[in-house]
């Protein structure tokens, strides 16, 4: 639902996605989930495209974080000890810590790439 007036406020509140035009009333802007700054209705399409790009980034970030964790948590728990002996215990926690740092850096860098979004 897209609206800008007092009569649109109940519909904006009840809608799955309520979008208020920035020049509208305060009631409409309070009840809407998204408030457009400009009075251009083409920004509604841009807002929807941006939200889809954001959800895509969230899914990518979850995938990479999951991959790092699935791969290296068993190593930190000692999965390689039967193959390399107990001396590997000194190395594995460091590798897991490095992987967690790399995972965080990957997620942040991937999120920053959302700045390149062009409608």
Image: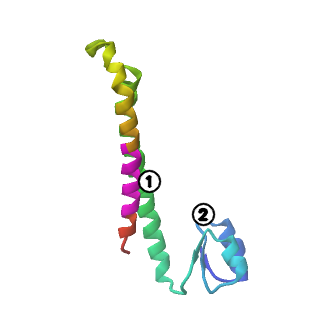
* 98 versus 49 height, above or below: above
Secondary structure, mark 1, is helix
- If the image is split into quadrants, where does the C terminus sit? bottom left
User: In the rendered image, which quarter is residue 63 located in?
Assistant: top left
Question: Is residue 106 part of the magenta span, yes or no?
Answer: yes
User: Which numbered disc, 2 or 1, marks the residue that appears first in the sequence?
Assistant: 2
Residue 90 coordinates in the image, percent (x, y): 36, 22
Magenta part of the chain: 102-113
Query: In the rendered view, would you say 19 is above or below 60?
Result: below
Q: Nearer the viewer, residue 91 or 71?
A: 91
Number of residues whose C-alpha sits closer than 10 Å to that of mark 2, classed few (under 14), some (14–19) or many (20 or more)? few
Q: In terms of secondary structure, where does tag 2 sit?
A: loop
Q: Which mark is residue 93?
A: none
Question: According to the image, label 1 marks what residue?
Answer: 58
Give the Cα distance between marks 2 and 1.
20 Å
Residue located at (40% from left, 29% from top) = 73
Name the chief secondary structure element in magenta: helix
Nearer to the camera, 13 or 88: 88
Residue 50 at x, y percent in the picture: 44, 68
Picture disc at residue 16: 2
Residue 79 in view (yes/no): no
Q: Residue 32 falls in which quadrant of the image?
A: bottom right
**Count of numbered circles on the image:** 2
- Relative to 22, residue 10 above or below: above
115 to the left or right of 29: left
Quadrant containing the N terminus is: bottom right
Q: Are marks 2 and 1 in contact (CB under 8 Å)?
A: no
The residue located at (65%, 84%) in the rendering is: 24
* In the foreground, 72 or 32: 72
Q: Is residue 43 visible?
A: yes
Please tell me whether residue 79 is drawn above or below residue 117 in the rendered image: above
Q: Nearer the viewer, mark 2 or mark 1?
A: 1
């Amino acid at each position: 639902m897209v609206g800008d007036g007092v009569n649109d406020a109940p519909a904006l509140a009840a809608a799955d996605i309520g979008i208020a035009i920035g020049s509208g009333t305060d009631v409409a802007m309070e009840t809407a989930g998204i408030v457009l700054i400009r009075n251009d209705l083409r920004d509604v399409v841009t807002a929807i495209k941006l939200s889809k790009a954001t959800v895509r980034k969230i899914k990518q970030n979850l995938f990479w974080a999951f991959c790092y964790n699935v791969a290296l948590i068993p190593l930190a728990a000692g999965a390689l000890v039967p193959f390399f002996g107990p001396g590997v215990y000194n190395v594995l926690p460091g590798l897991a810590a490095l992987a967690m740092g790399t995972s965080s850096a990957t997620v942040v860098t991937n999120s920053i790439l959302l700045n390149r979004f062009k409608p």
